[in-house]
Image: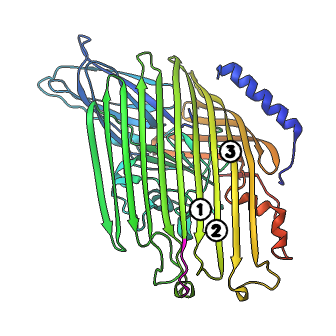
Amino acid sequence: MALQSDGCCKSIVLIALLLTILTVAVHAQRARGELRIEVRDSQGAAIACNAELVSQENQFHRSFQIASERQYLAHDIPFDVYRLSVDAKGFAPWAEVLEVRAEVPTYVAVTLRLTPVTTQVEVSDSSTLVDPERTGTQYSIGTRTLAENLPAQPGRDLSDLVDDLPGWVYEANGVLHPRGSEYDVQYVVNGVPLTENRSPAFAPPFDGNGVESMRVLTANYPAEYGRKLGGVIEVTTKQDAPPGLHGGFALGGGSFSTSNGSGAISYSQDGNHFLVAADGFHTDRYLDPPVLENFTNTGSGDGFSGVYEREFADGDRLSLGINHGATWFLVPNYLVQEDSGQRQNISNLETVGEISFQHLISSDLLLSISGSVRDASARLASNAFSTPVIVSQDRGYREGYVRSDLTGHEGRHDWKVGIDGIFNPVSEKLQYAITDPAEFDPGTQQQFQFSDHRWDVETSAYAQDQIHFGHWNISAGLRFDQYAFLVHQSELSPRIGVSRYLRSANLLIHASYDRVFQTPAMENLLLASSPTLDTLNPLVVRLPSSACAWQLL
């Protein structure tokens, strides 16, 4: 379906935004809930204890301490079935299987009994092997797998693990392709969507040592997810903040002069949480070289992040964060380029500031508001000995993202409505000079210069519901997207998933239908769409942009 202008849809989206704002009164994308845990003895006195939260199905494991003076908050818990166990000196151990199904907090009141002469508690982890209420295809990667992963090349900590999953495959230089889709991977980091290409050549990498868990979706996408839906990779960084001052670091090294390191320091007290982390690497084999000799393939990178979070007594939470990442590397040479002395340098820089506020309206109603500003740039420079072309490029954008959600739980329903928007000034510059005309078709322009700057505006509204009927489960959602960059188009995307849990066989059967509105890749889109390309060569072929797709799984 070709992108085209639709004035009527502009009116519809404005009305939808207005209605939602009036309903919500004005957090980022989330498929996570939270537990609020209180532990007391039989007389009602608070107890300090150790606790553990485990799910075999999604490889989740978190150990933490609960202080006697306050309720413990375990947030950013993926929806699933968990075993919670509590242990305190002088008391009998306690364990129970529970479910996290909505972003509205789940309250858990634990009462510990004094240790009797004989105590036996049997709650098996096997009860968390299958999520009986899941309606779509997803794969989870837990803390242990992340900790044991040793990537062959820096910058691929997370993508190497995703590449091992069914339906995913690598292209050159670490570009992930879900089910053959091109540049349609979306990362969601702590609820913030990243729709740009995150392969090592295009963006600073994530530090795998700071990640607690990942969830990978390839079907039955919630309506809150949009724009890039070939596959969704949800990343949750380490969230546990034990009281007091804590820290840790990791160092590594390998062949091709590879070295890396990371460290983090956290401090938590009286509802205030601080976290500062840094990482860096260097290697002589950053990208996939075109020749065995591995010419000019050095790369370096560093990153820094800081987070402050405040938990208020009434259940509200405020979070502020900043994250900076950078990579610098050389483009690998062919033998003829190495002999000529070619050096092509690329630098990718990214700085993000985030703010989010969560207000607990009632025990069954949660309001989340969030925003972020992302400043990113990618630069390529060539020296005078480059062949067959001397090229320089400068791409950049400053993305503003805002989002508001209202989440509720009522009876069989876990529902959510919300709006979000991306406001993004994009700029691209490119120039080249051909140094070896024999390598190009006759008539190719010997020198070229391009520069353009446009606004990308993408807005959406959505509603979704998870419905439970005994062993039957239904997920239903509707999303409205409007895309306005080089062209304009709007679309409604219905999505539905159904599952049936067979308890006797511990078997889950599910099917889903997704209609998704997928926007074109932003990288070099201004250049590829410019009529100035017609001057480069008499033969120029352009394909119409397509933004709609559907799948039945």
Residue under pointer 2: 392
Image: 321 above or below 512: above
49 and 527: which is toward the camera: 527
Does 242 sit left or right of 500 as displayed?
left
Q: Where is residue 101? Give x, y as percent.
A: 51, 32
Image depth: mark 3 or mark 2 in front = 2
Q: Is residue 392 visible?
A: yes
**Which structural element holds mark 3?**
strand
Cα distance between the residues tagged 1 and 2: 8 Å
Labels 3 & 2 near each other (Cβ < 8 A)? no
Image: 548 above or below 429: above
Q: Which residues are magenta?
A: 340-344
Image: 261 above or below 437: above
Q: Amino acid at mark 3?
A: Asn
Q: How is the image coloured?
A: rainbow
**Which structural element holds mark 2?**
strand
At label 2, counting other C-alpha atoms closer than 10 Å, the crowd grade (few under 14, some 14-19, many 20 or more) is some
Residue under pointer 1: 379
Does 513 sit left or right of 235 as displayed?
right
Residue under pointer 3: 424
